[in-house]
Amino acid sequence: MRGVNKVMLIGNLGRDPEIQILDGNIAVAKFPLATTETFKDRTGKLVSQTEWHTVVLWRGLAELAQKFLHKSSLVYIEGRLRTRNWDDKDGVKKFVTEIVGENLIMLDKKTDGTAASDHFDMNHNKGGENDNIEPNPF
């Protein structure tokens, strides 16, 4: 049986995307994304809880992120979880779990006040993003 590895997030960028160009002129972008959930606790008080996610975008999506996204941009990201591991300079094994974005919708308002629902889909670019790449490009 096949598994399902699907993530859908709506949140704000915690900083401008970091862009790196790898061998073969492959662009990769990385940024933190904050998602906030608000709920009432037992006393009825509203409580906000923010989770931070590391998002990685490849190729065309990375180039779009560089051009259009900035700190605080509101985006919808659809992708999959990927956990990488490597040994640091002291030989200690490190792990990181990231969201590899496959679809991106910018949700910020345009300057004229209308919603910017620009949708970018990179499903045709699946595969190969792990080929000949350093374990931690950032």
Image (spheres, grey):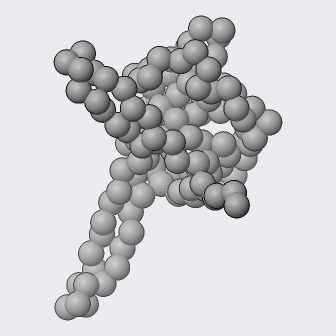
Would you place residue 97 above or below residue 51 in this image? Answer: above
In x, y percent, where is residue 88? 27, 21
Would you place residue 65 above or below residue 119 in this image? Answer: above
Instruction: Tell whether 16 sits left or right of 22.
Output: left
Residue occupying the point 72% across, 47% down: 119
Instruction: Tell whether 122 sits left or right of 107.
Output: right
117 or 83: nearer the eye?
A: 83
Q: Residue furthest front?
A: 1
Residue occupying the point 59% across, 26% down: 130
Q: Quadrant of residue 61?
A: top right
96 or 67: nearer the eye?
A: 96
In x, y percent, where is residue 50? 33, 60
Residue occupying the point 53% across, 57% down: 10
In x, y percent, where is residue 80? 58, 48
Q: Quadrant of residue 87?
A: top left
| Quadrant into which the C terminus falls | top left
Instruction: Tell whether 130 sits left or right of 16.
Output: right
Instruction: Tell whether 119 sits left or right of 49.
Output: right
